[in-house]
């Protein structure tokens, strides 16, 4: 098996596709009896070995859908394998929506929250902060439930658990009434934009930008709720700019850069010149995500939001040194701090900076240079994105790591859900 980017491969001894909670429990009980290890996979969109196992692989692709909704409280309980794109449609049918989402919607809800995945918004937390209750099968084969009110400490460990407490079966979300967003994509000068970034985040519900390396250009994306008006119909211009150019056109440029590394700067400038301005209104679940057909490797780090200006200046110097074989844009978003034990945004409002390399190119030197920069400012990586953390790093970066470790040992004392990757990362023998 391979992950989405193709940089991680593994060969499980068995792949299970349970279609009910009872079937999931039986898979766990069998593994316990056979003294086997289990790892779970959603869409394989993580760039680390978080899913890899040479033993039992469990997919919840056949366990998707709504379980129950409370339209008065705007809460929904969903099967943990439900993909975000399906979930958006199912919630919309109930007049509901998730408060915020990231820019990819192919992941399962379990994988999304387990890795601390996020969108952007100064007053909005990671997707895990929208979770109000969880249910799972732990490493003892037991059914476990917790929420913000019930077993609060365990709940804070489970909101971002990396699949180390067990197999999630049900996720209860605090939703909001369905809403429309006015999204505006623009091409702007990075020199003029950077002094305004703080204000852009403060004055808009969702704001993010992508800097095109070696250029003075950035692609900005701004979204705000609108009450009036019908959603815009998809038209040929939007289809051409948002799907064809951003995927097939960019794919050709990536291949060109792969074959002729000396052309990186030219290709980045061509990509920047091709940025089109888009303005449209649509329901939220149709706005957040963009289709990504070009495969890449990604490293994303969370830094304290107050360190953003200094980090970005240093980042631009590193990229503009032209020492690295890259041309992909660099993404910036912000997230409100939270109290989730393994969340990169734990106890701090955060800026997230994401760096990408075409999957056929070597990433090591580039990612190492930027990781050193991020780490110098207390950076914590997105759990699903590439990093070189050690067990000591994890303990140092996450103040509540020992509390999580205690819950993990209690929920999975025999390490049914541990893989060599996590044993090394968390220093577990």
Image: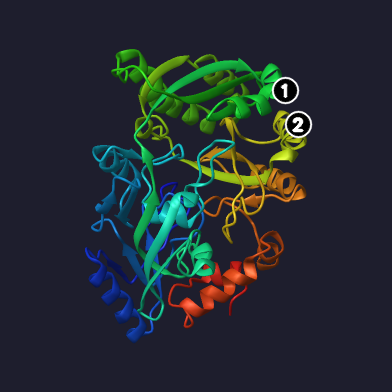
Disc 1: which residue = 195
**Residue at the image position 60 percent from the left and 66 percent from the top:** 425
Residue 148's x, y, as percent?
A: 48, 61
Give the alpha-carbon distance from disc 1 to disc 2, as whole Å. 12 Å
User: Label 1 crowding class (10 Å Cα cut-off): few <14, some 14-19, many 20+?
Assistant: few
Residue 236, label in figure: none
Residue 189's x, y, as percent?
A: 65, 16
**Residue at the image position 66 percent from the left and 67 percent from the top:** 391
Q: Does residue 242 sit above or below 160 in this rendering?
A: above
Q: Secondary structure at mark 1?
A: helix
335 vs 396, left or right, is left
- Disc with the residue nearer the chain's start (1 vs 2): 1
Residue 313, label in figure: 2
* Residue nearest the observer in this picture, 187 or 346: 346
**Residue at the image position 62 percent from the left and 23 percent from the top:** 265
**Residue at the image position 32 percent from the left and 51 percent from the top:** 76
């Amino acid at each position: 098996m391979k992950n989405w980017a193709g940089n991680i491969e593994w060969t499980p001894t068995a792949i299970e596709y349970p279609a009910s909670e009872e079937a999931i429990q039986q898979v766990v009980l069998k593994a316990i009896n056979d003294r086997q290890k289990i790892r779970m996979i959603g869409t394989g969109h993580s760039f680390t070995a978080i899913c890899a196992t040479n033993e039992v692989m469990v997919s919840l692709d056949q366990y998707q859908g709504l379980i129950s909704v409370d339209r008065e409280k705007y809460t929904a309980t969903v099967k943990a394998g439900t993909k975000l794109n399906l979930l958006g449609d199912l919630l919309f049918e109930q007049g509901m929506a998730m408060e915020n989402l990231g820019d990819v919607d192919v992941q399962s809800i379990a994988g999304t929250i387990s890795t601390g995945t996020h969108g952007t918004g100064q007053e909005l937390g990671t997707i895990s902060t929208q979770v109000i209750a969880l249910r799972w099968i732990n490493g003892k084969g037991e059914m476990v439930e917790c929420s913000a009110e019930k077993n609060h400490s365990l709940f804070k460990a489970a909101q971002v658990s990396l699949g180390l407490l067990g197999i999630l079966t049900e996720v209860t979300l605090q939703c909001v009434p369905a809403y429309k967003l006015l999204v505006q994509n623009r091409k702007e000068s990075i020199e003029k934009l950077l002094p305004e970034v703080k204000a852009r985040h403060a004055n808009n519900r969702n704001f993010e930008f992508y800097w095109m390396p070696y250029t003075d250009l950035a692609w900005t994306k701004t979204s705000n709720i609108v009450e009036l008006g019908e959603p815009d119909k998809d038209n040929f211009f939007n289809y051409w700019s948002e799907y064809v150019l951003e995927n097939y056109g960019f794919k050709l440029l990536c291949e060109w850069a792969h074959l002729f590394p000396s052309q990186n700067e030219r290709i980045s400038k061509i990509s920047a010149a091709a940025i089109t301005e888009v303005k449209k209104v649509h329901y939220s679940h149709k706005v957040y995500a963009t289709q990504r057909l070009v495969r890449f490797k990604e490293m994303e780090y969370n830094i304290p939001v107050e360190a953003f200006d200094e980090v970005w200046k240093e980042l631009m110097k590193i990229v503009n040194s032209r020492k690295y074989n890259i041309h992909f844009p660099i993404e910036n978003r912000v997230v409100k701090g939270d109290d989730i034990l393994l969340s990169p945004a734990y106890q701090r409002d955060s800026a997230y900076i994401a760096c990408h390399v075409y999957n056929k190119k070597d990433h090591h030197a580039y990612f190492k240079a930027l990781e050193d920069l991020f780490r110098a400012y207390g950076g914590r990586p997105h759990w699903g994105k590439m990093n070189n953390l050690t067990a000591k790093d994890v303990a140092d970066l996450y103040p509540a790591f020992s509390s999580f470790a205690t819950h993990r040992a209690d929920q999975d004392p025999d390490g049914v859900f541990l893989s060599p990757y996590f044993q090394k990362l968390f220093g577990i023998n």
